Amino acid sequence: MAHDHDAGRVCRVAVLASGTGSNLAALLGACADESYGAQVVAVGADRDGIGALDIARDAGVPTFVERVADHERRADWDRALTERTAAHEPDLVVSAGFLKLVGPRFLERFGDRYVNTHNSLLPAFPGMHGPRDALAYGVKVTGATLFFVDEGVDTGPIIAQVTVPVLDDDTEATLTERIKDAERAQLVEYVGRLARKGWTINERKVTIRD
């Protein structure tokens, strides 16, 4: 599966968020530089009243909210989220702390261009408690993984990874914060690289073009 970058055209990015929007803010900051090669064209959320929506509105970026509770079936929400996202014609969709698992309709439309981050070095410690699980296991190094989302939980093709050392006096809170910093920097760097250069996914191997 290849996504060629169309030289001279800015990559359109839709961001999905559920929280404070710190990753979104970092992406918007990067996009302010024309050489970055990407533009955030929409921010979607699964709930109202979150910081990410405020950040988007302050930046003049269109927003939408699609709540699971407003749909009888999860499949209906999945279809609605897909349509709301597709309306902005994104080249790349970024989960910036989006806490809902998208469904088959969304993945069918965006699966090879929907990126997410996880706070461990996958495939180690998937799921909700990456830093806690890493501490409990006693690893000396953990980190953050950027990947294309598939139908599994944190199982998609890996784009990039960054390591974060586990310190002897780390708590779940201190380790989580250091991973977040590394995760955010990695997200900004690689969204820009994907946007400027394009990528291929061959089985599980992701290659960003030179």
Image: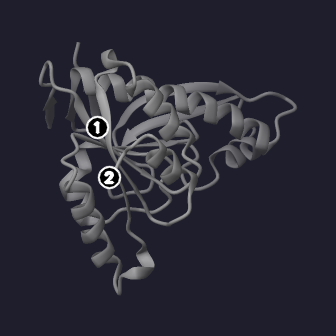
What is the number of the mark on residue 57?
none
Q: Quadrant of residue 152?
A: bottom left
* Residue 116 left/right relative to 204: right
| Image coloring type | one colour
* Residue 185 left/right relative to 45: right
Q: Is residue 78 visible?
A: yes
Q: Residue at x 72, y 43 (%)?
A: 137
Q: Residue at x 68, y 42 (%)?
A: 134
Of all residues, the one furthest to the right in this rendering is 169
Name the image quarter holding the C terminus. Answer: top left
Query: Which residue, given by chain and number where applicable, does mark 2 sit on?
Result: 150
Q: Quadrant of residue 142?
A: top right
Q: Position of residue 20 (x, y in %)?
A: 59, 49
Dot 1 amino acid type? Arg
Q: How many residues crowd around disc 2 within 10 Å: few (fewer than 14), some, or many (20 or more)?
A: many
Name the image quarter holding the N terminus. Answer: top left
* Residue 151 left/right relative to 203: right
| Along the viewing direction, whichever of 195 and 60 lies nearer the viewer | 60
Dot 2 amino acid type? Asp
Q: Is residue 122 visible?
A: no
What is the number of the mark on residue 204?
1
Of all residues, the one furthest to the bottom in this rendering is 72
Q: Secondary structure at mark 2?
A: loop
Q: CA distance from mark 2 to mark 1?
A: 11 Å
Q: How many residues crowd around disc 1 within 10 Å: few (fewer than 14), some, or many (20 or more)?
A: few
User: Mark 2 or mark 1, which is nearer to you?
Assistant: 2
Q: Residue at x 65, y 26 (%)?
A: 164
Precedes in sequence: disc 2 or disc 1? 2
Q: Secondary structure at mark 1?
A: loop
Q: Position of residue 40 (x, y in %)?
A: 34, 38
| Along the viewing direction, whichever of 101 and 203 lies nearer the viewer | 101
